[in-house]
């Protein structure tokens, strides 16, 4: 009886942290304030598109970094579009932004025209935003709340993970 | 008055490449002290990866803003952690890594000397 109890206790101690770990295994915690205030060119299919100042993010922002040459970025675009549709239909208090990095503007425009993301997409003119976010590669998706990066997701993202990230950002 | 003004301007123009090369040297110097986070064993100065290009761009802006080398290196440590440094400071785990080989060498020498002494005693 005693040995069974100790075995059960050992198994609980071993599997309990694993179960909570696997739940959020894909999110990498960051917890860091970010100062953005950077000029970005809007990607709207025009070569001489308008520029905007990407200010510090208030509220919840989901920032997706992508490049035209990146295969997983092409694969995830439909998922991001579906999530943007969810934001619009459910009137969710969250902003989805795509930032093109490590790329040429010409290629970013071609990508935009071909895959038609319908969330706000911008081009990093100065080629420095990736360092501000400590991006390691593309695609990467950052969950930002009131100017603070909470966590990031590396690799191809989908609608379900976006939803989970948004919910966790709300309760953070 | 006009002539001296022209002379000053000419001197400034001559000094411009010097200022520029100083900035270039500083950018190279800092880039050489930072590891490219997505490359294998390459510094930011050596790498041509897209991230290294962005990092060099940030260094260039910070140098032109008059930030010191320490300030710039501290900024990158804040962004990517201490592993970004090509020469990490000798403390904590890094200190242990530095100290382990000489300690092992000293212990080996001591064991070897003792064994030799023991063998000599046995022979005697």
Image (spheres, rainbow, N blue to C red):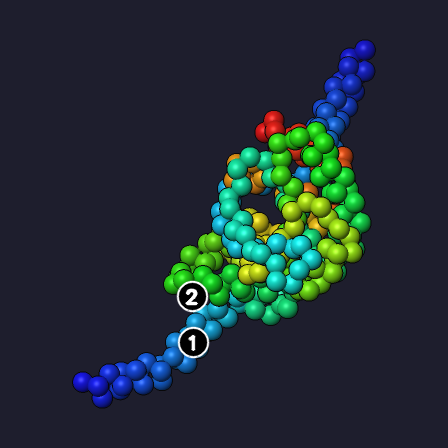
| Upstream in sequence: badge 1 or badge 2 | 1
Question: Local crowd at mark 1 within 10 Å, few (<14), some, or many (≥20)?
Answer: few
The image quadrant of residue B13 is: bottom left
Dot label at residue B64? 2
Dot label at residue A144? none
Q: Is residue A155 visible?
A: no
Q: Is residue A5 above or below residue A98?
A: above
Q: Are marks 1 and 2 in contact (CB under 8 Å)?
A: no
**Quarter of the image containing the C terminus of chain A?**
top right
Among all residues in the image, which is located at the extreme bottom?
A: B3
SS under mark 1 = helix
Among all residues in the image, which is located at the extreme left?
A: B1
Image location (x, y in percent) of residue B99: 54, 54
The residue at the point 46 percent across, 54 percent down is B74
Image location (x, y in percent) of residue B86: 55, 61
Image location (x, y in percent) of residue A49: 61, 58
Q: Which residue, given by chain and number where applicable, does mark 1 sit on?
A: B20
Q: Is residue A112 above or below residue B18?
A: above
Front position in the image: A61 or A110: A110
């Amino acid at each position: 009886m005693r040995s069974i109890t100790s075995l059960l206790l050992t198994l609980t101690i071993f599997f309990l942290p694993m179960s909570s770990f696997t739940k959020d295994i894909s999110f990498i915690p960051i917890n860091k304030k970010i100062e953005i205030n950077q000029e970005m060119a809007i990607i709207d299919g025009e070569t001489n598109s308008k520029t905007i100042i990407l200010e510090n993010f208030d509220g919840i922002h989901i920032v997706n970094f992508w490049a035209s040459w990146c295969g997983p970025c092409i694969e995830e675009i439909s998922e991001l579009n579906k999530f943007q549709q969810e934001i619009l239909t459910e009137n969710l208090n969250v902003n989805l932004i795509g930032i093109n990095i490590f790329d040429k503007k010409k290629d970013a425009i071609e990508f935009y025209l071909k895959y038609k993301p319908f969330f706000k997409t911008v081009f990093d003119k100065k080629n420095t935003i990736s360092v501000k976010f400590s991006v390691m590669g593309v695609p990467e998706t950052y969950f930002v709340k009131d100017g603070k990066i909470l966590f990031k997701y590396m690799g191809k993202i989908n609608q379900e993970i976006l939803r989970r990230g948004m919910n966790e950002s709300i309760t953070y | 008055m006009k002539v001296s003004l022209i002379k000053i301007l000419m001197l400034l123009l001559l000094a411009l490449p010097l200022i520029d090369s100083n900035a270039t040297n500083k950018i190279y110097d800092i880039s050489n002290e930072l590891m490219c986070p997505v490359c294998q064993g390459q510094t930011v100065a050596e790498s041509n990866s897209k991230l290294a290009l962005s990092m060099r761009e940030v260094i260039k802006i910070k140098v032109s803003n008059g930030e010191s080398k320490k300030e710039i290196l501290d900024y990158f440590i804040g962004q990517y952690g201490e592993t970004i440094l090509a020469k990490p400071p000798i403390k904590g785990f890094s200190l242990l890594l530095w100290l382990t080989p000489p300690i092992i060498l000293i212990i080996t020498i001591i064991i070897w000397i003792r064994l030799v002494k023991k063998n000599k005693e046995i022979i005697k």
